[in-house]
């Protein structure tokens, strides 16, 4: 019986080859799109799941309570060892510390060849990382590799970069900035799965004494280490909550805090490592994380596209069934039962779905390289070809094949024997309502996707083109290495000689980077301490404001002469000025750590951080020799020549350094990488959803023209023109598309408004966005229907009447 069902299903494919093509093509595009999205979502959800002990690994976070509270991803240096000592539930603790924003590393071979690179992917780490995170050693002894001072372990890629095919063990990599020789003690494999722990090399924890003093390492107020704990088996997260409060009291007691002060000031939390990538946007994250919201959005898009393809399938299958009414009647005459008819049509559906799945797999395989470029993240092949993924494909095949074919099967099998033998093709009002509802549903989704694309595009446009309060164009950010600082006078002279360089400034922070948060204390007239506040801090010189064209609202710029006296000064932004009251900030004295100085100016607010957040209070402290970056403002159309000039100057003045630069505008654009990727992917799938919907519309219009072929022939004989025929065939479908636009508008408005609320700066949703999307959908629908209408209008009416 099964063989008979399959043979008949195969033959039925070729009875209406055009509509079969539309079904298979639409379904294969839909399934391939869903596969890409689902694997992307699955990849996002898989972060840090590859660690063997992932269910027991937690990151310790520190949440400050009260006004101006911040939740920190990092913790004080002593916290890890103290937790392992005081909490018996903790099996192991591991700390990660970034020694600096970048390191200049080099290796000189025996032949005298030097390979030198600026590195930003290194951490100082406890030796317990080998056990906690299952580090796989390719070379070296896992038990001792991170135990000795000045030891470094490299990933395979980094070992290849510095040593080529040589054995790196025992060889020296030089930290050119700290001037520390680092001995290679191991080579490890990169994690074969996605993780928020991204590094190129690891330094042993004893090495930290070369980078930090004992005062910092014993501090309980400096959040400089990422602390991870491995709980013992059978210890639940809930049971640790009360323990963490007791530990906090013990930990901060040497800091001079009473238990009540400790509990009122902060709260320690244990964050599951598997939650970090999608659920964590804390202060001082190791790297920027993604957002679970986008996983939900992509999941919804996948569902929509799958439904679009399934609706196409249902609609076209239902219309195709009208061509098989006589076959159904004959089958019933020879004894076929309704159940057998349902099985036959389900087999038809499953065969089409199977063929679509095969084509979808080919499309999927071809699209992966382009999808990698689109999302800027690779698919790991070993994560694609897994049993769970094949299970997903099997489930998709069965669910789409059965659910999409069930309604047409039930509908067809209900034909009465008499109607079937008479080839009665009237679908009835009930069937018409269902089919029309499905068409409306398809275009509701398409309109939602298109309006969403327009809104996302305009929000991205705001991110990239909003006036940030400073000039970000034509500004180079050059990394200042130690050798460059030692020869800064000569480098300044070189830059001053070049007319293409309009201005330059040293700074600790570049707009778009994270600015450290510090506590400032205002002083009264008699040095009385008043209420303090938290603000972001950067150190810079007297040329910073002019280099970025930041206007001064009150007071003055820094005096260059202050550098010679060893004094310092503060300039604050308007957000910080509001804490003092209008016009009251200039002349006030501020204290931070050991530095006390006057506020000499207030600058207009500028967006030094992402537009996801509002402008925070900022303090700029005068210190022209503390910056790690050199900002260089270049004349228009002189960038390439100036970069070459700067590189040559650095090579001649500071030969042990390397010339490393970026563009300030590119760094700012990088703040929105997640949204940019989402926008690109959304654009592609919005177009695909519209394509699938229009394929279905074309298939239905072709069927409508076929069953009305006699009517069209008579109308042409009686004098109807082409436009009359097009109107007749298009009118009902265009009403459905218009209805879909009206239904989609409020749903899309409230959904996208909710998404925009996550940004401190966002566009307003305008009526024209819906008008543009509606016009686009109507235009494409009219074009689709007009093609079929013109084709029918051009047909010979004699042939049409003879056919009927």
Image: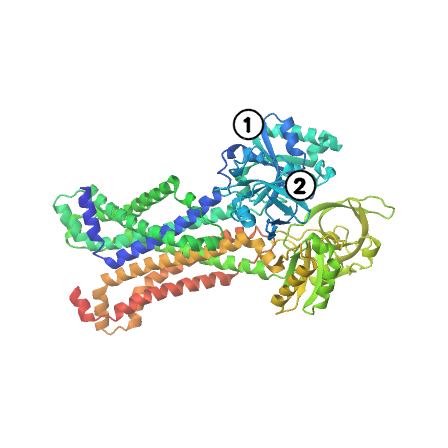
The structure residue drawn at horizontal position 59% and vertical position 28%, both measured from the top left corner, is: 90
The residue that mark 1 highlights is 232
Note whether 573 is above or below 158 in the view shown.
below
Residue found farthest to the left: 334
Q: Residues within 10 Å of mark 1 (few under 14, many from 20)?
A: some
Q: Which mark is residue 777?
A: none
Foreground pick, 407 / 210: 210
The answer to which image quadrant residue 786 occupies is: bottom left
Name the residue at the front extreme.
Answer: 111
Is residue 433 in view?
no
Q: Which residue is mark 2?
A: 224
Image quadrant in which the N terminus is located: top left
Q: Secondary structure at mark 1?
A: loop
- Direction from residue 619 to residue 115 in the image, left or right: left
* Residue 801 x %, y %: 17, 67
Q: Is residue 497 visible?
A: yes
Label 1 and label 2: CA atoms lie apart by: 26 Å
Badge 2 density bin: few <14, some 14–19, many ≥20, Cα 10 Å: many
Farthest residue, direction right: 526
x and y percentages locating residue 233 in the rendered image? 52, 27
Q: Nearer the viewer, residue 432 or 529?
A: 529
* Left or right side of 49 for 695: left
Q: How many marks?
A: 2
Residue at 47% x, 58% y is 451
Q: Quadrant of the C terminus?
A: bottom left
Q: Nearer the viewer, residue 576 or 547?
A: 547
The quarter of the displayed image where residue 91 is located: top right
């Amino acid at each position: 019986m099964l063989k008979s069902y399959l043979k008949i299903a195969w033959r039925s494919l070729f009875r209406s080859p055009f509509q079969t093509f539309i079904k298979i093509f639409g379904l294969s595009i839909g399934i391939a799109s869903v596969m890409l999205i689902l694997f992307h979502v699955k990849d996002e959800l898989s972060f840090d799941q590859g660690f063997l002990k992932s269910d027991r690994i937690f990151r310790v976070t520190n949440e400050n309570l009260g006004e101006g509270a911040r939740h920190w991803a990092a913790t004080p240096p002593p916290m890890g060892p103290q937790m392992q000592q005081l909490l018996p539930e903790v099996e192991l603790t591991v700390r990660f510390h970034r020694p600096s924003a970048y390191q200049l590393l080099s290796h000189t071979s025996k032949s005298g060849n030097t390979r030198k690179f600026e590195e930003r992917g290194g951490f100082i780490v406890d030796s317990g990382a080998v056990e906690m995170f299952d580090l796989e050693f390719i070379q070296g002894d896992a038990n001792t590799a991170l135990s000795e001072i000045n030891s470094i372990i490299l990933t395979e890629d980094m070992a290849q970069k510095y040593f080529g095919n040589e054995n790196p063990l025992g060889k020296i990599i030089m930290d050119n900035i700290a001037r520390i020789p680092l001995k290679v003690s191991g080579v490890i494999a990169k994690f074969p799965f996605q993780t928020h722990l991204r590094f190129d090399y690891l330094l042993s924890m004893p090495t930290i004494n070369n980078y930090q003093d004992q005062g910092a390492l014993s501090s309980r107020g400096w959040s400089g280490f990422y602390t991870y704990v491995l709980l013992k088996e059978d210890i639940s997260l809930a049971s640790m909550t009360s323990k963490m409060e007791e530990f906090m009291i013990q930990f901060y007691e040497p800091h001079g805090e009473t238990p009540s002060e400790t509990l009122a000031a902060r709260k320690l939390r244990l964050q599951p490592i598997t939650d970090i990538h999608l659920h964590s946007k804390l202060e001082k994250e190791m790297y920027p994380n993604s957002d679970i919201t986008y996983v939900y959005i992509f999941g919804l898009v996948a569902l929509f596209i799958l439904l679009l393809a399934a609706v196409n399938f249902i609609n076209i299958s239902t219309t195709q069934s009208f061509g098989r009414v006589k076959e159904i009647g004959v089958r019933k005459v020879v004894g076929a039962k309704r159940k057998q008819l349902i099985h036959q049509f389900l087999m038809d559906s499953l065969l089409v779905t199977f063929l679509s799945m095969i084509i979808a797999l080919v499309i999927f395989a071809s699209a992966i390289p382009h999808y990698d470029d689109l999302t800027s993240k690779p698919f790991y092949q070993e994560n694609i070809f897994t049993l769970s993924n094949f299970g997903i494909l099997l489930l998709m095949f069965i669910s789409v094949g059965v659910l999409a074919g069930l309604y047409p099967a039930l509908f067809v099998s209900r034909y009465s024997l008499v109607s079937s033998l008479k080839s009665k093709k009237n679908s009835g009002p009930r069937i018409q309502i269902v089919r029309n509802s499905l068409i409306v549903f398809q275009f509701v989704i398409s309109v939602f996707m298109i309006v969403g694309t327009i809104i996302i595009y305009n929000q991205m446009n705001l991110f990239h083109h909003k006036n940030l309060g400073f000039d970000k164009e034509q500004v180079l950010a050059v990394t200042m290495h130690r050798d460059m600082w030692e020869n800064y006078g000569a480098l300044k002279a070189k830059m001053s000689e070049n007319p293409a360089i309009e201005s330059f400034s040293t700074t600790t922070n570049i707009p778009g980077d994270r600015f450290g948060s510090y506590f400032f204390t205002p002083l009264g007239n008699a040095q009385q301490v008043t209420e303090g506040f938290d603000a972001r801090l950067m150190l810079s010189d007297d040329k910073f404001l002019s280099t970025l064209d930041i206007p001064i609202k009150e007071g003055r710029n820094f005096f260059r002469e202050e550098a010679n006296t060893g004094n310092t000064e503060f300039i604050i932004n308007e957000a910080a000025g509001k804490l003092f009251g209008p016009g009251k900030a200039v002349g006030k004295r501020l204290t931070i750590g050991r530095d006390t100085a006057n506020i000499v100016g207030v600058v207009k607010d500028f967006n030094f951080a992402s537009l996801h957040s509002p402008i925070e209070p900022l303090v700029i402290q005068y210190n022209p020799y503390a910056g790690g970056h050199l900002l260089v403002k270049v004349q228009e159309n002189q960038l390439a020549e100036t970069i070459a000039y700067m590189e040559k100057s650095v090579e001649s003045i500071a030969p042990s350094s390397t010339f490393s630069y970026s563009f300030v505008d590119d760094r700012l654009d990088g703040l929105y990488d997640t949204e940019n990727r989402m926008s690109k992917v959304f654009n592609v799938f919005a177009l695909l959803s519209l394509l699938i919907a229009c394929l279905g519309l074309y298939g239905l219009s072709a069927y409508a023209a076929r069953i009305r072929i006699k009517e069209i022939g008579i109308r042409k004989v009686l004098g109807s023109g082409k436009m009359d025929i097009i109107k007749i065939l298009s009118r009902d479908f265009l009403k459905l598309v218009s209805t879909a636009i009206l239904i989609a508008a409020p749903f899309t408005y409230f959904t996208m408004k909710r998404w925009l609320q996550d940004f401190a700066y966002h566009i307003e949703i305008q009526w024209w966005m819906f008008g543009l999307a509606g016009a686009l959908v109507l235009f494409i629908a009219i074009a689709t229907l007009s093609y079929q209408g013109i084709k029918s209008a051009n047909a010979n009416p004699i042939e049409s009447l003879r056919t009927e």
